[in-house]
Image (tube, rainbow, N blue to C red):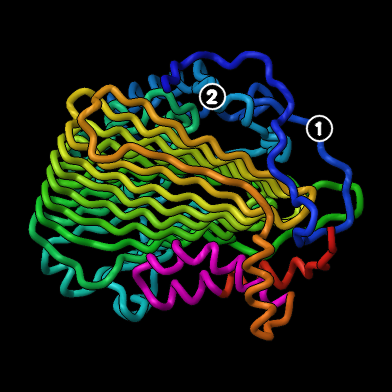
Amino acid sequence: MTTPSATPGPLAMLGSAATPGPGAAAVTRAAATKAPRRSPTDLTITFADEATVRERVAAAGEPDWLLADRLAALSRAVALPVETNRLYTLYVDLRNADLAGVRPYVASAAAVARSGDAASHLPDGADGLIELHEDAVPVCVLSDAARTAGVRLEPLAALAPRDADCFRAVIEGGAILPDDEKLAQLVRALWTSGIHLDVPAGVVLDRPIVMRTSAGVPGRAVISRTVITLGAGARAAIVEDLEPSGPQIGCAAGEPVPQALHLATTEVRLGADAELTFASLQDFTTGTVAFQTRCSELGDRATLHWALAQVGGRVAKSRVDNRLVGDGSSVEQVEIVFGSDDQLFDLTSYTRHIGRDTTGNLLSKAAMLDRSRAYIKGLTSIEKSAHGTDSFLGEFGMLLSKESRSVTIPSLEIDQPDCRRAGHASSVGPIDVNQLFYLESRGIDPDAARKFIVLGFLEPVVARIPREEERERLRSVLEEKWAAANPAVVAA
């Protein structure tokens, strides 16, 4: 199936997903008035202009080549629609995003502000920690072992004065960011914060690097660009926490709280025989809109493991691009969504098999409460050069109320018939009544049985997080969200 790029045409109403049928159990809440549909052309980011770019460059004293790079990215971003794929255009829904009053931070997040012994900031069982809090960098530390091995962990803006040539090499021209992604090009044009991690060839980190980003101040945009490089034979694990910078803010009745924006990219380059595990938990408040683009480029026999959890945010739009360039390279990607209230999640994955004997296994799951919606789209492309590809794409949704919706669109584009496997699968539906019957027949309370089934459905991501403390934190977040829903079981 081919998916040529084009500007979006008129938007039709959302396609309806499966809803609970007779005999199925569902979870419901009181109905609420739906917000009007907001098309991609209504995504108004008023700070995406040349004046903001020039103000940013002047404030940081950046060189002329970086100004030219930012302006080129801005020009591309302005010209692009939010979604270029005609298969997916109908399912772009931004009714919950109102960003007209949001303004970005201008100053670079480069200087590290910390007090006391640096080692005291390092979490147990971790080899490094960096924290980005709105427009500041409170902490950036490495273990002695990682520092001795030559590992570099620093704010992205701090790389420029330390090694100007390296800085230019990793970001100029958009590096590996997708050319057709409007939001990624906006980050390239306007980023003020970010992280640079470099693990030299042959270095093996036994403990993960923790990256914490806090956002959520009303009316503010955190625009961040993270660049990760692993040399040949290197091995590392990263735990990314995306969390609120403060409690949810309320206003008087009838007065809306301005939304916050987290706009970010993550760029991963893996050398030959390198291996990276990247686990992320997004748990922003419902006053935050999160737009994330992650992309990777893999060398010969390199291995990448993505484990991504989307729980918070009012609107969470995620795109993952994997380019398996090297022979024998492989990617495993697992992503989950747990939605409630009127949250909206938009997940897109692109995996391009270019080298010989590459492997891709991608699994996405969504559990949706109340009036939440999830759109899960994926495209696997097998190019002519990709002999011996083994690829599978699975997308599954679980509907826990009659008003929740989920759309899954897995697709394949195959130009090389010499494949070991090229498959996809998808399904959307309520909790399986047979699973409920089995658990209840063993004496388990019906409400507890539903909880076990839903959390077990999401467990594949939890189990892949490399740090036990983070695994338990994600389990707690999922359980708290289930408890907050206070579901009332209704027999259909």
Q: Nearer the viewer, mark 2 or mark 1?
A: 2
Identify the amino acid type marked 2. Answer: Leu
Q: Which residue is drawn at the image coordinates 26% and 72% (left, top)?
A: 207
Q: Which residue is mark 2?
A: 87
Quadrant location of the C terminus in the rendered image: bottom right
Is residue 47 positioned above or below 374 on the image? above
Label 1: which secondary element = loop
Residue 284 in view here: no
Identify the amino acid type marked 1. Answer: Pro
Q: As rendered, which of 128 and 399 lies closer to the eye?
A: 399
Task: Please give the label number shown on residue 36.
Answer: 1
The secondary structure that most of the magenta stretch takes on is helix
Q: Which residues are magenta?
A: 447-475
Q: Is residue 345 left or right of residue 223?
A: right
Relative image position of residue 135 (x, y in whole percent): 49, 52
Q: Is residue 408 left or right of residue 154?
A: right
- Asked if the residue under mark 1 is in contact with the one under mark 2, i.e. CB atoms within 8 Å, the reply is no
Q: As rendered, which of 272 and 67 lies closer to the eye?
A: 272
Q: Quadrant of residue 205?
A: bottom left
How far apart are the two marked residues, 2 and 1, measured between alpha carbons? 23 Å
Q: Which residue is drawn at the image coordinates 51% and 37% (left, top)?
A: 377
Relative image position of residue 407 (x, y in whole percent): 62, 39
Q: Is residue 457 magenta?
A: yes
Q: Which residue is drawn at the image coordinates 63% and 52% (left, top)?
A: 313
